[in-house]
Amino acid sequence: MEKTKILNALKELRNSKKRNFVQSVDLIILLKNIDLKKTENQKELFLTLPKQVGKDFKVCAFVGLETYEEAKNNCNKVILDKELEEYAKNMRAMKKLARDYDFFIAQANIMPQVASVFGKVLAPRGKMPNPKAGSIFPPKSPLKQLVSKLRNTVKISIKKNPMVQVIVGTEKMSDEDLAENIMAVHEFIVHNLPGGKNNIKSVLLKLTMSPPVKLE
């Protein structure tokens, strides 16, 4: 993907109607000639972007007492293993938690409990702690690096629909940084498609509230 095309598209996006909040910049890739009924073509991928996204992704940790202080110092919310049963009795609280937090991480030895209690709420939303993202960890693990990485990680899901939509930053970022993230995501997706570029129908960029701008 040519960087000049991306920069031109970003310039066009910035001419969109201004909003009274900071809009996200999304990369949209429409797919073709890919049979998503075949499990081998279904993907759930995680990519750490080269540039900071500019959005504060919130992280919630499920831990035992031995990792509590470490989690408290690095995560937005901490839930101890002994608190899980209380959540099991409160579906509303679980759904609110799923809405409010972007990533969930879990201590490996309590992951079965987490799955039993939160699986029905987090799994359908694609938010269960996932080893592919490194979000399941041993007791007493240092969490600063993991949480920092997650806050700059995007999830790419190719399962039901022949389309991928991924946040690549916000309108506060420079066009150069946005372009670097866009190229990284595009290359990563192409690499993971069975037919590579032949599976891509079109590529677009959009702000949260703007019409899409076609890249290719």
Image: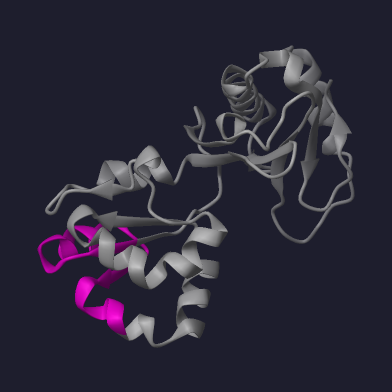
Q: Residue 27: x percent and y percent?
A: 71, 35
Q: Check the image and name the residue furthest to the front.
A: 38
Horizontal side of 12 relative to 93 (left or right) equals: right
Please tell me which residue is depicted at 56% across the width and 29% down the height of the picture: 40
The question of residue 158 being in magenta is answered with: no
Task: Give the position of the C terminus as an image quadrant.
Answer: top right
Horizontal side of 159 relative to 2 (left or right) equals: left
Towards the viewer: 210 or 171: 210
Towards the viewer: 194 or 168: 194
Please tell me which residue is depicted at 36% across the width and 81% down the height of the picture: 87
| Residue 133 in the image: above or below residue 92 | above
Horizontal side of 209 relative to 87 (left or right) equals: right
Q: Residue 77: x percent and y percent?
A: 35, 68
Q: Is residue 101 visible?
A: no
Task: Give the position of the N terminus as an image quadrant.
Answer: top right
Count of residue discs: 0
Q: Quadrant of the rendered structure where residue 80 is?
A: bottom left
Does the magenta stretch mainly form a helix, a strand or a loop?
helix
Please tell me which residue is depicted at 65% across the width and 27% down the height of the picture: 182
Horizontal side of 158 relative to 130 (left or right) equals: right
Please tell me which residue is depicted at 39% across the width and 47% down the height of the picture: 130
Towards the viewer: 46 or 211: 46
Q: Is residue 105 visible?
A: yes
Name the colour scheme. one colour
Q: Residue 47: x percent and y percent?
A: 49, 32
Q: Residue 65: x percent and y percent?
A: 13, 68
Please report the bounds of the magenta region as a residue range.
61-85
Q: Quadrant of the rendered structure where residue 178 is?
A: top right
| Residue 40 in the image: above or below residue 72 | above
The question of residue 74 being in magenta is answered with: yes
| Residue 94 in the image: above or below residue 165 | below
